Amino acid sequence: MQIIFATMSRLFFVLMIGVSLFMLFRGHNEPGGGFIGGLIAALGFALLAMARGVETARRALVVHPVALMGSGLLLAFVSGLPGLLSDRSFLTHWWTEIGSTHLGTATTFDIGVYCVVVGGVLCLVFRLYEGIEQ
Amino acid sequence: MAWIIIIALAGAAIARPAAELLGKASGWVMSLVPLVLFVLILRHAGDVADGGAVIATMSWVPSLGVDLTLRLDGFSMLFGLLITGIGTLVTIYAGAYFAEKPVADMGRFLALILLFMTAMLGTVLSDDLIVMFVFWELTSLTSFMLIGFDGHKPEARKAAIQSLLVTGGGGLVLFAGILLIGMTLGTFSFTEVLARSDELVASPWAGVIAVLIMIGAFTKSAQVPFHFWLPNAMAAPTPASAYLHSATMVKLGIFLLARFDGVFATMPAFGTTLVIVGSLTMTVAALKALRAEGYKAVLAHSTVASLGILVMLIGLDGEVAAVATVGFILAHALYKAALFFCAGTAIHATGETSLRKLGGLARFLPVTAVAAVLASLSMAGLPPFVGFISKEYLFEAQLTNGWNVVPIVVAVLVNAVMCGVAGVVSIKPFYFKSHRVDAVKHGETPVLLIGPLLLATGGIVIGLFPGGIGDLLIGPAASALYGSPIDVSFQLWHGLTPMLVLSVLVVSIGVAIVIWWDAIHDRLRRHDRLFRLIGDGGYHWVVDGTLNVARLSTRILQNGDQRRYTAVVVAVVVAGLAIALFAGPAGLYIAAPDGSLRVSVTLVLLLSAAGAVATVLGRSLIAALVSVGIVGFAVAVIFMLNGAPDLALTQIAVETLLVILLTAVLLRLPARQRHSRTVGERRRDAALAGAFGLVIFLAVASMSAIPLDMSLTEYFGQTSYLEGFGRNVVNVILVDYRAIDTLGEIAVVAFATIAAWALLRGSGPSKRAKE
């Protein structure tokens, strides 16, 4: 069971990260968004932590969860600055059209939300699972 | 004009690294910042000479209607010049005062002093009341940090907190007054408030606004009953005392009252209150000055008395009162800052703070002694010093106002005490033979002398040639204060007038006080009860009372038992909802169910109810966790069935995460454990839980009886793609319409998580080193 779980966890992890990114980017038009995407990604990392240890999950995340959270917050904040410059209104988003998709600072904002959620959840998950014998 | 604030702020920002780089020379170099600002402000002298004002506006928070409007008129120019001028001398002086201290201390001090200067300039220059309030509170904060500069001393910490509580609290009262002005007039611009003062005075809120603003000013300027914090603030390093607690910050209250005197001119009670409070403060402070022992303490009490005089002067009407106010502000700033500098040099040289133990210092500090004598002659109000002129105006203002005799008697006596204090603080430590100091740790250095000498000679130069300063500063400032141009003849000699008689009387009593100082002092020290009454007992009573209430409520509410916390929260929610439901205007109304029974929804609800029951009855924590999970997933399905896929997705993800997090916690707990709750406690829990469920049921049922207002839904549905380029309305609301709320929420999530993360730090048995 442990071996099967550990082996499958890799696959699930990749799948869940993929789904989370999908959720993140389709969120503007279909159900989804940064918050849900972030939760799913965090679940993926939590799965990895449960199956292969917190260290593996930490390495997969590359950056420290607190740093991720901070950069997410910064990203969301920065995404509001262009609007401040052009319209004198913080968080009024800029948009550009590439083909039929609209991209804009709202997407950046959502990525910020995503990062905060992933970082925040993983802060706690890693902390709680550290020190528990596999 | 905005450059004034920007340069000052930049100076504060670079002070610390500059001090590291420059070492001992940093006092000189950093003093260039206030000096440049002094020149910049002085360049506007021509523009305000006729009582006009220079105004510069830039938009700051347009959506709240807050503009960064700066307004320089004669009165704020007087303050601006005092702030930057004395600021220059303080920075130079601090360079020598901190010479033996670590460089980091000097950097910290200079940074705080310059930050304080920025805040002061902002307060006196801003026209928008909200902006002024922000700077006003910034002065309180920097004052707090400077009083607590020697944070390792308990008395410094106590004094710092006291001053912050009093001045910061007073600032909040002032803020309430400002908000009421905004509510009444619909503007925060002071220029406009002044123009529409009739409207303000006629409004029903006028009295409340006046009281709130007076309280704000009284706390800042240490008026009775808030007079106690200023003498305690002497725990600050002496350069800071000279700057903040005599020359500039404590005069902000005066500044504010003087500004609003124009607004409330038609409200007689305003002036009367000021005269009464000012006279009371003068009396109390004079008594305390006679009794004080520390060199700085005596000066501090006399400062409080001077502030009382100023408050009283603002309460008086007429041109002469305006001139007297302005003249006294200038004279007091010059001589008091100089005396503080001299006190600082004497204390620095001997390490002795008590006035009684200092004597014969003139041998070691000859120039300081001369500066002290010059400054104190101005303080005593002797000709040909500027202090004499301002005192003449003070008496003239009182006499021409036709006030009854009590305030005049008070003014004469208090001025006599000030005269006595002036004599004592300058003659006793430097020339008296008793308690002679035989050796000093440091002599005086030229740097320590610049400040006191310049200020003290300034007092005599202005006294001898009052015309120039009268046209340049006093006239415009008094005109701005009075509201229309005044022809000021600021002169030394007024001829043989009743004022001169009063002056002679003051000096004679003052000389008597100097001669019998020790005797008066000893006599007063015996009256402990009286001085406890006029001390800071009330403050301690309030603070201790608050702390006791906090301790009591903590013992009851925060006793560390999680079950009790949950019970309190649940009980409050139940009570709140029940009151809202039964006592609300609509009363309890539940719609009769309509439509047919939806089988699928019913089944899911039954499942979730079964999960809830299983949770309560489950014997192990794991079983309870799984059962709670059933409820959560059932809720997700309900969302799904009702067409809210976003909510359902989130609910499922959160539910899963909850299981993962709780599992980690449970892994550290014993899997099976008997209940530690007694039967009675379990019954109480059950009753609470049942009540909670019932109330929520009633709330949901009555909520669904209210017809749903669909206008918002329609608005978002229609505009979401056109304005936000997204078809998922929920997401567009989150990232666009309400993006600032979301930003706030993720910030809260981040900060809460960091706190939890830090708290969990110790829980892991190992791996701490890796973090």
Image: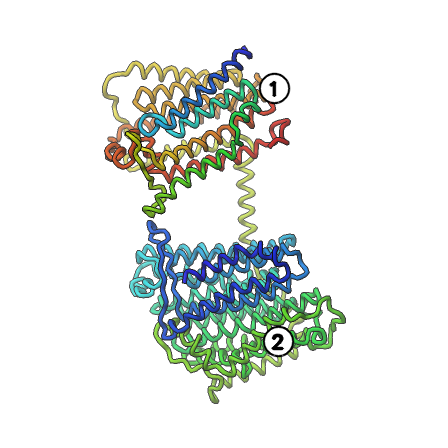
Q: Tell me, yes or no, if residue B199 can be seen here.
A: yes
The chain containing the residue under callout 1 comes to A
Q: Secondary structure at mark 1?
A: loop
What residue is drawn where x is 61% and y is 27%? B764
Image quarter of the C terminus of chain B: top right
Instruction: Choose between B738 and B569: the one closer to the eye.
Output: B738
Q: B659 or B78: nearer the eye?
A: B78
Residue under label 1? A133
Q: Quadrant of residue B385?
A: bottom right
Percent across and percent down for residue A41 are 45, 25
CA distance for labels 2 and 1:
77 Å
| Residue B677 seen in render | no
Circle number at residue B371: 2
Q: Residue furthest bottom?
A: B496
| Total marks placed | 2
Relative placement, left or right, of B341 versus A20 is: right
Residue B102 placement: quadrant: bottom right
Residue A2 in the image: above or below residue B109? above
Q: Chain of mark 2?
A: B
Horizontal relation, residue A76 to residue B166: left or right: left
Instruction: Return the x and y of residue B326 as percentages of the image width and height.
Output: 45, 73
B177 and B4: which is toward the camera = B4
User: What amino acid is found at the position of numbered circle 1 in the picture?
Assistant: Glu
